[in-house]
Amino acid sequence: MKNMRLDRFLSNSGIGSRKEVKAIIKAQRVLVDDKIVKDPGFIIDPSKTKVMVDNQPVVYKKFYYLMLNKPAGVISATRDNLHQTVVDLLPPQYQHLSLFPVGRLDKDTEGLLILTNDGKLAHRILSPKKRVPKTYYAVIEGKVTFEDIQAFQRGIKLDEDFTTLPAQLTILKSCDRSQVHVTIFEGKYHQVKRMFEAVDKKVVYLKRISMGNLCLDQNLMPGQVRELTQEELNLFME
Ligand code: URA
């Protein structure tokens, strides 16, 4: 691991913003190899140096992987002048880690969103070549039919030069307000909504329930977040 400044190390470890950790260092609350260090620019080797804040060891993690159950009403961005973002929802210890959402959900869409600072993992999940399946639960205004299943299976033409890959549509309930599961293999703008529009139906509720083999944790309430387990992370490493 590369050597780095003490303030950066502490900030990347979730202790606080650069400004906050500088204050913590100045307040002599930081021990480096058992000695108080007052210089935020002090260089350490994260793999060797023992760092303690208020006598608690600081464990350095280069990458963070979070699962968020995105609520409706927030946007899948890191920063926005007008709207609350998914990053605004994170607990303080995750605020200063430059985390970003892996892909986007519409403002009114809920469900599984991964946030990370690992660009390679994000690429692995988002790369069109990988065709990582994304499954949504949706409520549809209108009766979803077997013909719709067949149309989705053929691929839906969204515009002149784009037809989706074959998508799997499963009807959970077919009536005036139908309930379905739909699995798509790309991530085009408003894709699920536009696919239903193409068969003259309207999505009135949309929630992502899985990406690849990773399922949304049923215990996470909307707005709640937790770190992925190593097992869950491995699902994307194959
Ligand atoms: N498809 C949509 O239409 N919206 C989303 O948020 C995700 C997929």
Image (cartoon, rainbow, N blue to C red):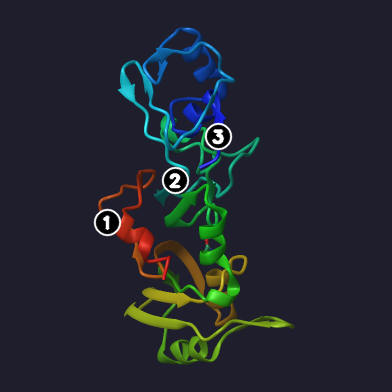
Is 6 drawn above or below residue 3 in the view shown? Answer: above
For the C terminus, give its image quadrant: bottom left
Is residue 16 among what the camera can see? yes
Q: Residue at x 59, y 39 (%)?
A: 83
Is 72 drawn above or below residue 82 in the view shown? Answer: below
Q: In the image, residue 111 lies at what x, y percent?
A: 41, 56
Kindly state the secondary structure of the residue where label 3 is placed. loop
Q: Residue at x 47, y 46 (%)?
A: 63
Marks 2 and 3, how far apart at CA: 19 Å
Query: Mark 2 or mark 3: which is in front?
Result: 3
Query: What residue did someone put label 2 on?
Result: 64
Check disc 2 and give the amino acid type.
Tyr
Check disc 1 and give the amino acid type.
Gln
Q: Residues within 10 Å of mark 3 (few under 14, many from 20)?
A: few
* Between discs 2 and 3, the one toward the N terminus: 3
Tell me whether the residue at label 1 lies in contact with that at label 2, contact meaning CB atoms closer than 8 angstroms.
Answer: no
Tell me whether the residue at label 2 lies in contact with that at label 3, contact meaning CB atoms closer than 8 angstroms.
Answer: no
Kindly state the secondary structure of the residue where label 1 is placed. loop
Kindly state the secondary structure of the residue where label 2 is placed. loop
Check disc 3 and give the amino acid type.
Asn
Query: What residue did someone put label 3 on?
Result: 3
